[in-house]
């Protein structure tokens, strides 16, 4: 029974981490974590000039600007901070598809129409590769903070 209770807590923690909410002991560390996570996620969003068949497709810089963090909030004995993508306007349409990947198909006709370098292209669907800009940014931040905590703990021994 104790093993099951421990596992439930780990699953809950994992779900909260996936949603971008992190419980941290002090307000200052929570604020620093949030800012680092936001900056790491933004750094993983492809630049407008990045290649592919459609140079700069859907990467107007709005996605990078919409990655935000909340101020730390007191919860129980710790502080929480949330890192998320503010889904406003067109960003809502492509934030998820760039994170998880997928296929975009035409809704209002047989083809999607794109203007690529001054030339119109018609295609029935477009496959967006998974970029994991959010997951990679959060993972890098967690590794950095874990390593720093490890270094502080070793320094006390």
Image (cartoon, rainbow, N blue to C red):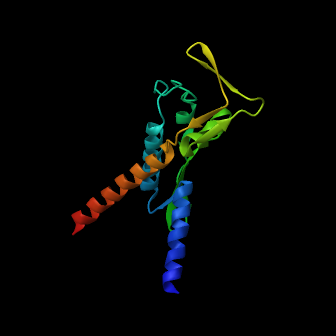
Tally of numbered discs: 0
- For the point 68% across and 35% down, the residue is 105
Q: Position of residue 37 (x, y in %)?
A: 45, 47
Q: Position of residue 27 (x, y in %)?
A: 46, 56
24, above or below 95, in the image = below
Q: Position of residue 90 (x, y in %)?
A: 66, 32
Quarter containing the C terminus: bottom left
Query: Which residue of the protein is positioned furthest toward the top in this rendering?
Result: 118
Query: Which residue of the protein is positioned furthest toward the bottom in this rendering?
Result: 1
Tell whether 142 sits left or right of 77.
left
34, above or below 65, in the image = below
Residue 129 visible, this orientation:
yes
Query: Which one is nearer the viewer's eye here, 86 or 45?
Result: 45
Query: Which residue of the protein is positioned furthest toward the right in this rendering?
Result: 108
Residue 88 visible, this orientation:
no
96, above or below 78, in the image = above
- For the point 50% across and 70% down, the residue is 10
Residue 89 lies in what quarter of the image? top right
Q: Position of residue 26 (x, y in %)?
A: 44, 60
Residue 60 lies in what quarter of the image? top right
Query: Which one is nearer the viewer's eye here, 83 or 93?
Result: 93
- For the point 49% across and 26% down, the residue is 48
């Amino acid at each position: 029974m104790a093993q099951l209770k421990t596992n439930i807590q780990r699953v809950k923690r994992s779900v909260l981490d996936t949603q971008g909410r992190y419980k941290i002991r002090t307000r200052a560390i929570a604020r620093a974590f949030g800012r680092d996570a936001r900056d790491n996620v933004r750094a993983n969003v492809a630049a407008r000039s990045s290649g592919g068949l459609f140079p700069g497709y859907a990467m107007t810089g709005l996605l990078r600007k919409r990655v935000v963090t909340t101020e730390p909030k007191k919860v129980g004995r710790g502080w929480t901070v949330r890192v998320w993508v503010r889904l406003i306007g067109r960003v809502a349409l492509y934030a998820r598809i760039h994170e998880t990947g997928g296929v975009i198909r035409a809704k209002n006709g047989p083809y999607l129409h794109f203007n690529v370098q001054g030339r119109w292209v018609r295609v029935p669907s477009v496959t967006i590769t998974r970029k994991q800009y959010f997951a990679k940014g959060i993972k890098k931040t967690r590794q950095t903070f874990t390593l720093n905590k490890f270094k502080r703990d070793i320094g006390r021994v």
